[in-house]
């Protein structure tokens, strides 16, 4: 699988875990060997894997967890490092997110997620078949 497609696959797995409130899947997509960071909207930065996973547990088990969809992902691959910038569509509005990935044991693992408020995304162009891989 081309690296661009492999990164999109990992990014799709991240959002699938989010949508399904699947803490085990969310844990599996985050790096274990590389330090990780996460900045949720309105939260302080998290820079410890245990803190990051505790934050996801709080989000995914919340009775008010929202539906989320990833739209318009843009992928850049730089050797064993990759960046995905995308729009997040939620029940309450729109966010823009940056997800950074690193290769660990030949699999793309997320090392940073940051999302913040954004205006509605522009109309989507013709969808790339690689946009949703799960």
Image: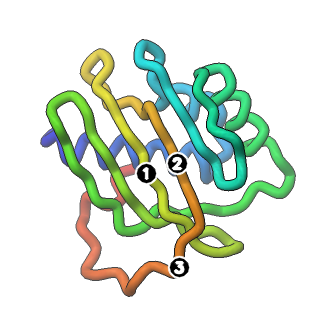
Specify which label sits upstream in the sequence, 1 or 3. 1
Specify which label sits upstream in the sequence, 1 or 2. 1
Note whether 96 is above or below 37 in the view shown: below
**Residue in front for this viewpoint, 122 or 125:** 122
Where does the image place residue 97, in percent across and percent down from the top left?
A: 48, 56
Q: Residue furthest front?
A: 44
> What's the distance in space between the residues labelled 1 and 3, CA to CA?
15 Å
Q: Which residue is mark 2?
A: 114
Q: Residue at x 56, y 33 (%)?
A: 25
> What's the distance in space between the residues labelled 1 and 2, CA to CA?
5 Å
The chosen color scheme is: rainbow
Where does the image place residue 37, in percent across and percent down from the top left?
A: 53, 32
Where does the image place residue 51, in percent across and percent down from the top left?
A: 68, 25
Say whether residue 101 is left or right of residue 81.
right
Q: Which residue is mark 3?
A: 119
Note whether 56 is above or below 30 in the view shown: below
Residue contact at pointers 1 and 2, CB within 8 angstroms: yes
Specify which label sits upstream in the sequence, 3 or 2. 2
At label 1, counting other C-alpha atoms closer than 10 Å, the crowd grade (few under 14, some 14-19, many 20 or more) is some
Q: Residue at x 25, y 21 (%)?
A: 106
Q: Residue at x 28, y 73 (%)?
A: 127
At mark 1, the secondary structure is strand
Label drawn at residue 6: none
Q: Which residue is mark 1?
A: 98
Q: Residue furthest right?
A: 63
Where does the image place residue 31, in percent across and percent down from the top left?
A: 45, 23
């Amino acid at each position: 699988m081309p690296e661009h497609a492999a990164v999109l696959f990992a990014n799709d797995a991240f959002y699938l875990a989010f949508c399904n409130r699947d803490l085990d899947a969310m844990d599996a997509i985050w790096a274990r060997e590389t330090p990780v960071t996460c900045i949720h909207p309105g939260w302080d930065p998290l820079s410890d894997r245990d803190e990051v996973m505790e934050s996801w547990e709080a989000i995914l088990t919340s009775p008010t967890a929202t539906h989320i969809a990833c739209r318009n992902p843009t992928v850049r691959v730089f050797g064993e490092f990759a960046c995905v910038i995308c729009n997040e569509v939620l029940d309450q509005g729109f966010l823009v997110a940056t997800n950074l990935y690193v290769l660990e044991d030949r699999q793309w693992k997320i090392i940073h997620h940051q999302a913040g408020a954004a205006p509605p995304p522009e109309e989507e162009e013709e969808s790339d078949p690689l946009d949703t891989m799960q």
